[in-house]
Every structure is written in C-alpha cells, then in structure tokens.
Image: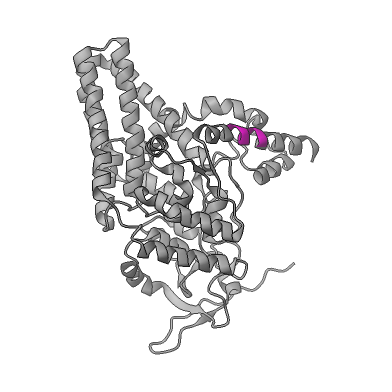
Amino acid sequence: MEEPEPEPEPEPEPAGSSPRRFTWEEIGLRAGRGHPQQERWLVIDRKVYDISQFYRRHPGGARVISHYAGQDATDPFRAFHLDKALVRKYMNSLLIGELAPEQPSFEPSKNKLLVEDFRELRTTVERMGLLNPNHLFFFLLLLHILLLDAAAWLTIWYFGSSLLPFLFSALLLGTVQAQAGWLQHDFGHLSVFSKSKWNHLVHKFVIGHLKGAPASWWNHLHFQHHAKPNCFRKDPDVNMHPLFFALGKTLSVELGMKKKKFMPYNHQHKYFFIIGPPALVPLYFQWYIFYFAVQRRQWVDLAWMLTFYIRFFLTYLPLLGVKGLLGLFLLVRLIESNWFVWVTQMNHIPMHIDYDKNVDWFSTQLQATCNVHQSLFNDWFSGHLNFQIEHHLFPTMPRHNYWKVAPLVKSLCAKHGIEYQSKPLLTAFGDIVHSLKDSGELWLDAYLHK
C-alpha cells in the first residue's frame, strides 16, 4: 500500500480574511506521529491550534499537551487552567482556523450527550463555587504537618535515642512526609490560591523544603497522568509495564502473545510486596529526583531540595550521630514509600489499563479511577484521594469540596449507565494484589497457549 501524499502546510490567514475550516479527519492526521511526521494540532472550543513549534515551550510540559495532538482538548484545557482568558491570549498566535460548520464540536466517535452533560455539570460546579478554596482548611493542614515535624525532633531530644523514641519519631516523620505529599499535591494542582504564581511558589516550599523533591519533576509526571490516566505510553504511572509488571487485561494478553517475559509476571502479586511499596521511594525516587533536577537544570528546585536535607542533617546529627541519622532517614523513607504506594495505586491499578482510545473526558477518568468510602480517617490518611473520581474530573477543585460534588457525579454516571466504583479502604488495598494476580495469569495463559 502506498503512503498518502502529505497535505500542504496551512498558510497564515491574510488580515481580514475568513478563518480556514478543517475537518476532524484532517486534524486526526496531525497527532505528531505517522504522516505528516512533525505536525501537532489540537482543538479547543472548535478553534484549531497548531502546537507543532509551541509544545516544547508549553509551561505545563511538552508531553501533556502532545498527548492531545490530533484530538479535541476542550475539557482538559478547562480542567487544568485557572485563568483561561489569560491563556487564550497567548494561544492566539497558534490559532490556524476552526472546525468547518458541518463538523461536530468534538470527534464524531465520542458520546455527544455525555460530553454535553459533563460540560453542563462543570458549569454547575463553577456556579456553586466548588472550585473556590477555603484557605483556613489548607493553613490547618500545613500547621498540623509542622507540629508533627517539631514533635518528632522533640521526642528524641527529650527522651533520647533509645529504640522506642527512635521508632516513634520515625513514625511521626513518616506521617509528615506522607501528609506533606498530599499537601504539595494540592498546591501542584493550583487548588489553594486563585493565582497560579502563589500556588507554584508555595508548592516549591512544601515539596522542596518539607519533602526534598523538585516541583518540576512532580509537574512533569503528574499532569500527564491526569491528562491520560492508565493510558499506556501516555500515563507515566503505568510505565512499570512491562519491565516490572504486566498491567491490565489487554496489555497483559498482548505481552504474552508477543512471548515477552521481563519478569515472572505470574508471581507479580507476590514480588509486588518487595519491589513495590517498600522500594519505590528509598531505592528509586530518592536518587532519581536529584538526577532529574540536575539533568534538566532545575537549579531553583535543587536549591529548595537541599534546604530539606541540610535542615534534616543539622537537626538530627547532634542527637543521633551519622549512623543513627542515616538509619532514621531510611526508615522514614520506608514508611513514606509504603504509605504512598498503597494509597496512590488503590485507585488505578485495579481499573482499566490500555492504549489511548481517545474517548471523552468523563469516560476517560471514570474507567481509570475508583473511590474509597468516605470517613474522617480515610480522608486524612489518603489526603482526600479516596475521592479519586471527583479529583480526576475536576483536578483544580480544592479537596474539601469533593464530597459536595460526588452526588452530582454519581447522578451523571447513573444517567449514562457508567459504573461509579467506591469500596472500603482495605478492600481497595486487596484489589491491587488481586488485579496483579489476574493480569499475571492472563499473561501466562497467553504466553503458553496463544
């Protein structure tokens, strides 16, 4: 079969002329792959933008915007940006035309009624003020983290470095790291202040000074995850497939049929307990964050990170000595790692994992996320990520409002026959292991018999 001839580049519109009109077929060809090779277009509110030269300069990251090349990006654009009017001014130079009048506002393959109903829901959410933060709520969260941090040091200072106060202090510091992780997540999602710059500034303090990690690293990975959750090659959170784990039914069977075996996947539900929760932070994140900051020349982030390590060493070295300090640090990272992995994976690993099928925003998020039942403990323990569905649909929504929007989301799911999954906390933990066992068995069957 012969390759189709490349279509000509769109020419700039003369002043005063009518905008160029495009079809979805033309736009779908500009996905940054295939033919033509380098072009990337996307659609927002029926306007067509050429991001071929811009995507590398995109403030939110090159990959997250590229994941929507060749697609309608209206809903993610609304979901991720606070000051949309300001952003649109910068987008004017990228505008090359609009959809032809006979073309639908989004791809014909998407559920028209569902897209329209969700956009109406977002309008309702904005009108109800559910995107407005309660600053006192976030101040109290920060205060309780700082108090726990101080209590950890005071425990060893007052009671000494014997085993019991040492372990209690490590538990307090592990809690600080987990809770600071949830709080930096709020600032990273622009959920605390109405101005992006204030969110970015405090984000650097919380993730840099309180946790010792670079904000740019979190932004680079996490926004991709939200743009295309559980989409292989677009969501970095599922990049552990296939090197360490076989994830999802479709991908696991595909891996088995290709006779690929990087690990004994039929035992992955067992070795998950070794290379998963206990190892991710101390054995991977701990060194990679420094590599990321240096390799990408994120010197401001690196400076913030160093303030954490300097403060930790200066405050605990006189009390514990070098060996005790290193032991405490490793134990804290171990506690944090287990807490982080179980909470972040319970909402996604048991859900649908596949290549990007370019379905509507609502369906994309619902098929990749599930909730954990609401309680005061679950809210605190997970940083309100037990409301993962609501968080993914409205990523800039302050977490104290998730419970308010949840009934509206459930209602929309019921109307369109979409499952809204919510389960107990321990069941959610167990489902991680069960899903790994299931996908491992699917891989083995395909590997041996297909």
Q: Where is residue 361 in the image (x, y as percent from the top left)?
A: 52, 60
Residue at 57% x, 57% y is 414
Residue 169 vs residue 73, the one in the foreground: 169
Residue 294 visible: no
In the picture provided, is 54 more to the left or to the right than 31?
left
In the rendered view, would you say 422 is above or below 273?
below
In the rendered view, would you say 228 is above or below 278?
below
Residue 1 vs residue 103, the one in the foreground: 103
**Span highlighted in magenta in the image:** 433-438
* Magenta-drawn stretch contains 231: no
Residue sticking out furthest to the right: 449
Q: Where is residue 329 in the image (x, y as percent from the top left)?
A: 33, 23
In the picture provided, is 154 more to the left or to the right than 295?
left
In the picture provided, is 198 more to the left or to the right than 121?
left
Residue at 55% x, 77% y is 8
In the rendered view, would you say 21 is above or below 348?
below
